[in-house]
Amino acid sequence: MSTIRVFLVDDHAVVRRGMRAFFEMLDDIEVVGEAGDGQAALDELAVRATADDLPDVVLMDLLMPRLDGIGATKAIKQLYPQVEVVALTSFSEAERVHVALEAGAAGYLLKDAEADQVGAAVRAAMRGQVHLDPAVARTLTRSLVAPQRTATALTPREREILVLVAHGKSNRDIAEALVISERTARTHVSNVLNKLGLASRTQAALWAVREGLVTGP
């Protein structure tokens, strides 16, 4: 089996050094490059693409200056769909995991993951499989088995608000569309999230699509 070529993206040099040190101990994975933020990663990958020298897997931090890991992951999957991305972060909230996976990540690891988990995630990505940190998998499982809310819990006005949120409208946009104050719009959005047990506008948009209240992109 050929060596898996990995590219590291993290704004902390000490993290990159630690990852390099770990991968140097493995026979089947090698680090071929690194970058300190998402934009630097895209710049480097563009150069490598012209030389037909793209990595197999990018290990991507999510919180970085200039361009974060979510934006960089989306761009990489659009420009180089053959390159797999594994997210590496300190946060295990279900919403962050969903956003990373929707952006195209083939794995989600916490920065305190054991070294063998990192290697397993890289190898799984190469096999076309999704690998989740065990703590992340537990978080996702809990979110999936949480009590399900339905649209019947919402008032007609709240359903209108939800549809507008799903279409990406801001509180100001909603206020203008419904001829209400921005403060009232904000209160309605908060009520919708609370009634549906959701944590963000992104979750609300996904929920609305899933329930058939709006069509997907």
Image (spheres, rainbow, N blue to C red):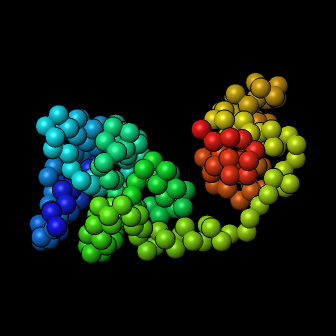
Residue 24, compared with residue 215, is above or below; it is below
Quarter of the figure with residue 197: bottom right
Q: Nearer the viewer, residue 103 or 200?
A: 103
Q: Nearer the viewer, residue 204 or 5?
A: 5
Q: Nearer the viewer, residue 53 or 203?
A: 53
Residue 189, compared with residue 31, is above or below; it is above
Quarter of the figure with residue 57: bottom left
Which residue is located at x 19 percent, y 60 percent?
4
Q: Taking 31 as reference, is 84 left or right?
A: right
- Percent coordinates x, y for residue 70 in the rendering: 42, 46
- Percent coordinates x, y for residue 31 in the rendering: 15, 57
Outermost residue to the front: 1
Which residue is located at x 82 percent, y 43 percent?
158
- Percent coordinates x, y for residue 156 in the rendering: 88, 43
Q: Quadrant of the N terminus?
A: bottom left
Which residue is located at x 59 percent, y 38 percent?
217
Residue 99, compared with residue 50, is above or below; it is below
Q: Taking 18 as reference, is 203 left or right?
A: right
Q: Is residue 186 visible?
A: no
Q: Is residue 83 visible?
A: yes
How many marks are shown on the rendered structure? 0
- Percent coordinates x, y for residue 187 in the rendering: 77, 42
Quarter of the figure with residue 16: bottom left
Which residue is located at x 81 percent, y 43 percent?
159
